[in-house]
């Protein structure tokens, strides 16, 4: 039997923090009488697995994980947090520039928490995508004969209108050295991609320009790459494939600037 240890004070603090962050968001994006689903907060699962004293415990039957695991994932699950070295900024630059995105890793306890949380939200919401739409993005899909996920947009071009994208902190960040934060930009429109789901030249130009204005400029980055790194996973590495998104890593940015992004 798996024993669960929950740090209730930490979870309660996370509820309050999330409520304050949501309250700062535009009232037009949040449905009336919105209630935070406290049982599905990532912080609940993170505190549970960080406090679990059994490093060999898994939140799922070994032959039935909530999603397909790579050899790298299985190795991570065999480690304790103390045995793992987090990513440095130099290492992140190397992995992104050489397209070794499958080498980005979470803390072992965070990976276990992520797997437990994924199983939970799939059972409760049907999918991670549905949880994100209902609890984080507040976007309402529109019916479409192609069955593709579509939304009402203010402009058909990505980033042309602020209502058509959302900048949120990543609840399931990778393992970084202190000072590095992880942000995800979610879009209602699709970005132009190649046959493998990676950005093509047009898509990269769109994201580069948005990142320059929204992140590099506001972070006061004088040398490109010194404070901001961005990347978009190819389809095979995405855990939420139906919703367009890309990742932004920021380093040594003032808290007041972070607050503009870390909703």
Image (cartoon, helix red, strand yellow):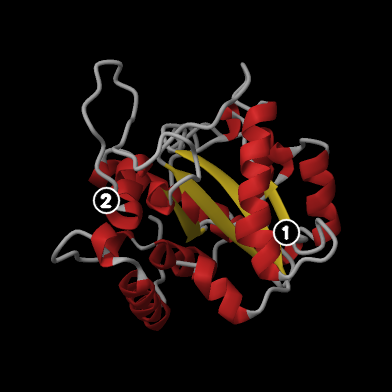
Determine whether 16 is above or below 80 in the image: below
Residue at image location 62% in from the left, 39% down from the top: 206
Determine whether 139 is above or below 149 in the image: below
Determine whether 219 is above or below 215 in the image: below
* Marks 2 and 1, how far apart at CA: 29 Å
Identify the residue under disc 1: 228
Helix, strand or loop status at disc 2: helix
171 or 214: which is nearer to us?
A: 214
Apparent side of residue 6 relative to residue 76 in the rendered image (left or right):
left
Residue at image location 20% in from the left, 66% down from the top: 35
Apparent side of residue 125 relative to residue 259 in the rendered image (left or right):
left
Q: Earlier in the sequence, mark 2 or mark 1?
A: 2
Q: Nearer the viewer, mark 2 or mark 1?
A: 1
Residue at image location 43% in from the left, 67% down from the top: 43
Occupied quadrant, residue 66: top left
| Residue 134, label in figure | 2
């Amino acid at each position: 039997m798996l024993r669960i240890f929950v740090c209730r004070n930490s979870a309660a603090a996370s509820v309050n923090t999330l409520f304050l962050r949501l309250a700062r968001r535009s009232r037009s994006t949040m449905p009336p009488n919105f209630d935070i689903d406290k049982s599905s907060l990532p912080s609940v699962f993170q505190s549970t697995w960080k406090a679990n004293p059994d490093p060999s415990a898994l939140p799922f039957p070994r032959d039935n994980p909530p999603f397909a695991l790579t050899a790298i994932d299985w190795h991570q699950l065999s480690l304790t947090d103390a045995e793992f070295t987090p990513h440095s900024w130099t290492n992140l630059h190397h992995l992104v520039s050489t397209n070794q995105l499958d080498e980005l890793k979470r803390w072992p306890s965070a990976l276990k928490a992520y797997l437990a949380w994924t199983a939970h939200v799939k059972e409760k919401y049907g999918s991670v995508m549905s949880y994100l739409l209902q609890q984080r993005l507040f976007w309402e899909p529109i019916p479409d004969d192609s069955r593709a996920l579509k939304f009402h947009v203010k402009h058909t071009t990505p980033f042309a209108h602020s209502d058509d994208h959302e900048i949120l902190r990543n609840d399931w960040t990778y393992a970084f050295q202190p000072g590095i934060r992880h942000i995800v930009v979610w879009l209602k429109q699709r970005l132009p991609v190649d046959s493998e789901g990676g950005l093509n030249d047009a898509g990269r130009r769109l994201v580069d320009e948005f990142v320059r204005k929204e992140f590099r400029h506001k972070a006061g980055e004088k040398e490109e790459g010194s404070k901001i790194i961005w990347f978009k996973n190819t389809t095979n590495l995405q855990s939420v494939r139906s919703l367009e998104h890309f990742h932004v890593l920021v380093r040594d940015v003032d808290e007041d600037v972070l607050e503009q992004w870390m909703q």
